[in-house]
Image (tube, rainbow, N blue to C red):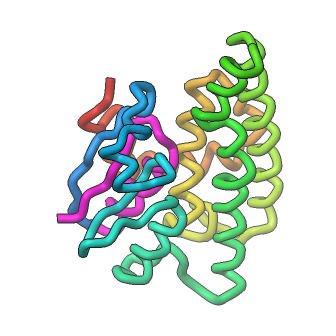
Amino acid sequence: MRQLYSYFRSSASFRVRIALNLKGLEHAIVPVHLLHGEQLQPAFLGVNPAGLVPALAEHGAVLTQSLAIMEYLDETHPEPPLLPGTPLDRARMRALALAIACEIHPLNNLKVLKYLKHALGASDDARNAWYRHWVESGLAALERQLEPGPPGRYCHGERPTLPDCCLVPQIFNARRFDCRLDHVPGVMRIFDQCMQLDAFQRAAPAAQPDAE
């Protein structure tokens, strides 16, 4: 049985949970509580020396980094594809996914927010303002990137693909921090469409065994 080391609120873990569900791949969740520092304990560092979730263990190997894991799943279980179409199509889908995973998320993940508070002395209000600024401006840029794309209900066409797996967790986090979202109607239309699907619903934070 493949194992996914995951934290219920981790957006990177959420991405992989969606991909596993879309592909119908059975997996066991191994909770790693980030707020309790379990990711920095020797037991988990032996799994992923970077001290990050997600980590996917199968066939005696451990894979890390959510996008790398999802592309591995796509290569080893190609149906339904997360990166269908032509090389140009796949380049666009990767660009949309990376816009979220590399431009928006890193500025607002847990270790950055902790550093702002504990090392730089930022107040909760200042930290939350930081979060909202980068999420709201990043989603506005994503909205512009989506506009010239092919028609469809999702980020790229009529079925969920790699960028949809990244978009939905980012919106969950944006809502948790009370970010403005009325300026990105296209993004929210896609989010609502995704959340009608069982694969996304079962991957949501509240549906996880470690949810609080």
- Residue 38's x, y, as percent? 37, 35
**How many marks overall?**
0
Is 195 left, or right, of 149 in this rendering? left
Vertical side of 99 occupied by 203: above or below: above
Going 24% across and 36% down the picture, which residue do you hit? 209
Image: magenta residue range: 1-24
In the displayed structure, does residue 206 sit left or right of residue 195?
Answer: left
* Image quadrant containing the C terminus: top left
**Residue 158: x, y in percent?**
54, 69
Front in this rendered view, residue 117 or 169: 117
Viewer-proximal residue among 58 and 40 = 40
| Identity of the residue drawn at 74% across and 51% down | 103
Quarter of the image where the N terminus is located: bottom left
Q: Is residue 99 magenta?
A: no
Is residue 10 shown in magenta? yes
136 lies left or right of 193: right
Residue at the image position 62 percent from the left and 23 percent from the top: 177
Q: Residue furthest bottom?
A: 86
Is residue 184 in view? yes
Give the x, y percent position of residue 75. 43, 83
Q: Quadrant location of residue 94?
A: bottom right
Q: Name the quadrant containing residue 81.
A: bottom left
Whether residue 192 is visible, yes or no, is: no
Farthest front residue? 42
Residue 201: % across, % down:
36, 45
Identity of the residue drawn at 26% across and 48% down? 29
- Quadrant in the rendering for residue 140: top right
Q: Does 20 sit above or below residue 37? A: below
